[in-house]
Image (spheres, helix red, strand yellow):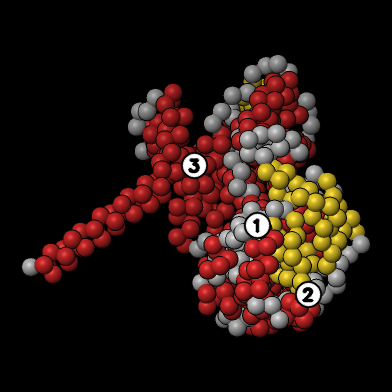
C-alpha cells in the first residue's frame, strides 16, 4: 500500500523530469549533440526561481526569468562549440562548470535556498500533488504543442535538418552554427524551466540538484521512445513518450526505494538504466549478425556434405 | 558566370602529409556552359568543386560567381548561387525528414527563413508535379521519409532540390558514381533534362570518359591541381575515347588512372 500513496508524488515529479527530458530531446535527438550543460542549467532555473521568490517577485516572473537564464546558458555552450570550435561535449562540460559558480553566486554563496510554500503562491508543491499534476500537465502539453508548431515553420525545419544532415543544410543555405546555438538555447531554456518547477515542488533550490540530471533526461527519452516508436514515429507521440518515460522513471525510483534500496545507490540505478538502453540495440545488432553468419556457414557445410554423399 | 583566378590550396602545410591540391587553377565558365570534368585520383577535381562551394577557404586566388567575389563568403551564404549534388547519396538529403520538407528547405535557399509555415499547400502541389517528371513513382510519397528511398531516388531528389531555386551554377560531384549502371543512366538522363530545360551553367565531375564526352558542351581535364585540357564546341563533340586517352597521357606524363581506362 505505501507504493500507492507514493504514486501521485511520483507522477508529479515524473512530469517535471519529463519536461526536462523534452529539453534534452531537443539537443540529443534533434540537434544530435550530447549537451552536458543541462546538469548546470536545471540548477540555474531552480536557483533563479527560488531567489526571486524569496525576494518577493511574483511566481510568473520567476518562472520566465528561469527560462531566459537557461536559454543564456545554452547560448554560451553553443557559442563555445560553434564560434570557438570546442567539441560539443566539452563545451557542455565547461559551461556546466561555469554554471556551478554562477549558481552558487545566485544562491548568495549558500548551497540551499528554501522556498516557503505558505507565503508564496507556488504553481506546484509536494503538499498538493493533484494540483501539481494538473499544472505540470498543462505546462508539458503547452510546451509540446508550441514545439510541434515550431518545427513546422521555416526556421524549425532548418533546425531539424541541421541535426539530421548538417552537410545538406549548409548546401541549402542553412546557417548550421546559428541553428545549433538557437537549438541549445531553447533546449536549456526548457531544462531551466523544469528546474524552476522542481525547486517549487521540493520547496528549495539545492546547488547539487543537477548532478546526473542529463542521465535522468536520457533515461526518460530511452524509456519513452522504446514504447512510442513502436506506436507511431512522429514528433508529438515521441514527446508524449518522453514525458511518459519521466513518469515511469519516477515510479520505478519510488518502487525501488520502497523495496529497500539505499538512497546512495540511486544515481547508480539511473546510470545503469541509461547504459542498458544504450547497450541493448548495439548488442542486438552484434548478436544478430554473428548468428546469421554462423547459420549461413552451417548451411553451406551441410549442402556441401549432401552433394558429396 | 564562374571565374576562378589563380586558385591555390595546400592541405596540411608544413607536415609530412602536405599536399598541394590546387596549383594556380584558372577557369572561366560562360553563362550556359555545361562542362564535364575528368582527371585521375588526386587531380584536384573535388577540391575545385569544394573550393567553389566554400567548404574551406583557398590559400590564395579568387572565385567569382556571376560577377560577385565569393572567395571569403561562408559556405551557407554562397549556397544561394549554387546547386550541389554529392557523390554520396546520403549527403544531399535529410533522411529523417519528409521528401516535401527536404524540397521546401531547398526551395528557400538564399532567402531569409521566417516564422511562417515551412511547407505550404500550393508548394506540395508543385512538388508533386515536379516529382512526377522524374518518373520514379515519388509523387505519391511526398510525406514519406527520405531515408526510406534508394540511392538513385535520393540522388534524383537531391538534383531536384539543387535546381528548385534556379542556381547560377550547378555542381555535380560524381553524382552517379555510387549507383548501379541502370540507375546511374537514369539519373544522368534526368540531369540532362533539368540542365537543358533550365539552361543551367554546370560543372560535372565524372570518372567515366564516355559520359564526359557524351554530356555537355565543354570538357575539362585536370591533373596535378590545374587544368591541362580544355576543349569545347565541335572539337569536343567529335572527341573519341582514344583521343581523350592520348591527350591525357600527354598531359600527365603517362600517369593514366585505371578507373578511367576501364570505364
Work out whether residue A136 or residue B11 is closer to the camera in this orientation and state it. B11
Using the numbered discs, state the Cα–Cα distance from disc 1 to disc 3 in whole angstroms: 62 Å
Q: Position of residue B138 (x, y in %)?
A: 59, 78
Work out whether residue A308 or residue A289 is closer to the camera in this orientation and state it. A308
Q: Chain of mark 1?
A: B
- Asked if A98 appears above or below B2 in the picture, the reply is above
Q: Quadrant of residue A167?
A: bottom right
Q: Which mark is residue B253?
A: 1
Q: Position of residue B8 (x, y in %)?
A: 78, 48
Residue at 78%, 64% (x, y): give it. B82
Work out whether residue A122 or residue B107 is closer to the camera in this orientation and state it. B107
* Residue hosting label 3: A219
Q: Which mark is residue B232?
A: 2
Image quadrant occupied by the C terminus of chain A: bottom left
* Secondary-structure class at tag 2: strand
Using the numbered discs, state the Cα–Cα distance from disc 3 to disc 2 in whole angstroms: 62 Å
Examine the rendering and report whether any part of residue B163 can be seen.
Answer: yes
Q: Residues within 10 Å of mark 1 (few under 14, many from 20)?
A: few
* Secondary-structure class at tag 3: helix
Residue at 52%, 36% (x, y): give it. A215
Tell whether A307 sits left or right of B58.
left
Q: Position of residue A200 (x, y in %)?
A: 64, 33
Tell whether A90 sits left or right of B238.
left
Amino acid at each position: 500500500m505505501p507504493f500507492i500513496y507514493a504514486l501521485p508524488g511520483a507522477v508529479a515529479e515524473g512530469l517535471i523530469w519529463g519536461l526536462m527530458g523534452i529539453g534534452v530531446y531537443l539537443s540529443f535527438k534533434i540537434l544530435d549533440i550530447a549537451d552536458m550543460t543541462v546538469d548546470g542549467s536545471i540548477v540555474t532555473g531552480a536557483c533563479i526561481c527560488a531567489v526571486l521568490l524569496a525576494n518577493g517577485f511574483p511566481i510568473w516572473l520567476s518562472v520566465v526569468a528561469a527560462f531566459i537564464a537557461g536559454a543564456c546558458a545554452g547560448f554560451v555552450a553553443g557559442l563555445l562549440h560553434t564560434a570557438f570550435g570546442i567539441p560539443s561535449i566539452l563545451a557542455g562540460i565547461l559551461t556546466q562548470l561555469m554554471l556551478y559558480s554562477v549558481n552558487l553566486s545566485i544562491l548568495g554563496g549558500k548551497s540551499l535556498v528554501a522556498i516557503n510554500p505558505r507565503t508564496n503562491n507556488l504553481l506546484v508543491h509536494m503538499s498538493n500533488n493533484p494540483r501539481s499534476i494538473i499544472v505540470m500537465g498543462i505546462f508539458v502539453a503547452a510546451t509540446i504543442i508550441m514545439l510541434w508548431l515550431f518545427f513546422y515553420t521555416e526556421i524549425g525545419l532548418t533546425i531539424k535538418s541541421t541535426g539530421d544532415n548538417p552537410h545538406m543544410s549548409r548546401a541549402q543555405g542553412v546557417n548550421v552554427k546559428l541553428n545549433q546555438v538557437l537549438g541549445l538555447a531553447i533546449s536549456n531554456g526548457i531544462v531551466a524551466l523544469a528546474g524552476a518547477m522542481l525547486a517549487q515542488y521540493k520547496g528549495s533550490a539545492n546547488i547539487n540538484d543537477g548532478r546526473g540530471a542529463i542521465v535522468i533526461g536520457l533515461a526518460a527519452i530511452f524509456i519513452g521512445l522504446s514504447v512510442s516508436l513502436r506506436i507511431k514515429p512522429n514528433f508529438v507521440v515521441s514527446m508524449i513518450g518522453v514525458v511518459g518515460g519521466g513518469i515511469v522513471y519516477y515510479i520505478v525510483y519510488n518502487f525501488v526505494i520502497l523495496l529497500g534500496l539505499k538512497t546512495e545507490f540511486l544515481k547508480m540505478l539511473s546510470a545503469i538504466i541509461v547504459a542498458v538502453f544504450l547497450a541493448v540495440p548495439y548488442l542486438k545488432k552484434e548478436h544478430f549478425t554473428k548468428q546469421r553468419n554462423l547459420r549461413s556457414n552451417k548451411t553451406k557445410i551441410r549442402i556441401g556434405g549432401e552433394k558429396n554423399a | 558566370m564562374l571565374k576562378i583566378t589563380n586558385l591555390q590550396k595546400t592541405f596540411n602545410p608544413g607536415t609530412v602529409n602536405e599536399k598541394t591540391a590546387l596549383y594556380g587553377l584558372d577557369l572561366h565558365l560562360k553563362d550556359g556552359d555545361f562542362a564535364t570534368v575528368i582527371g585521375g585520383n588526386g587531380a584536384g577535381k573535388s577540391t575545385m568543386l569544394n573550393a567553389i562551394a566554400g567548404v574551406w577557404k583557398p590559400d590564395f586566388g579568387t572565385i567569382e560567381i556571376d560577377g560577385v567575389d565569393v572567395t571569403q563568403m561562408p559556405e551557407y551564404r554562397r549556397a544561394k548561387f549554387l546547386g550541389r549534388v554529392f557523390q554520396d547519396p546520403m549527403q544531399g538529403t535529410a533522411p529523417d525528414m519528409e521528401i516535401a520538407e527536404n524540397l521546401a528547405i531547398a526551395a528557400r535557399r538564399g532567402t531569409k527563413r521566417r516564422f511562417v509555415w515551412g511547407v505550404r499547400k500550393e508548394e506540395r502541389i508543385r512538388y508533386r508535379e515536379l516529382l512526377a517528371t522524374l518518373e520514379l513513382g515519388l509523387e505519391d510519397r511526398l510525406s514519406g521519409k527520405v531515408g526510406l528511398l534508394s540511392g538513385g531516388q535520393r540522388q534524383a531528389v537531391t538534383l531536384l532540390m539543387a535546381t528548385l531555386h534556379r542556381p547560377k551554377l550547378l555542381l555535380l560531384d560524381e553524382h552517379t558514381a555510387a549507383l548501379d549502371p541502370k540507375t546511374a543512366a537514369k539519373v544522368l538522363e534526368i540531369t540532362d533534362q533539368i540542365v537543358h530545360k533550365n539552361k543551367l551553367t554546370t560543372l560535372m565531375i565524372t570518372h567515366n570518359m564516355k559520359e564526359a564526352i557524351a554530356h555537355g558542351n565543354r570538357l575539362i581535364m585536370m591533373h596535378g591541381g590545374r587544368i591541362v585540357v580544355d576543349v569545347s564546341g565541335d572539337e569536343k563533340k567529335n572527341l573519341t575515347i582514344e583521343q581523350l586517352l592520348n591527350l591525357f597521357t600527354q598531359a600527365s606524363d603517362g600517369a593514366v588512372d585505371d578507373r578511367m581506362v576501364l570505364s
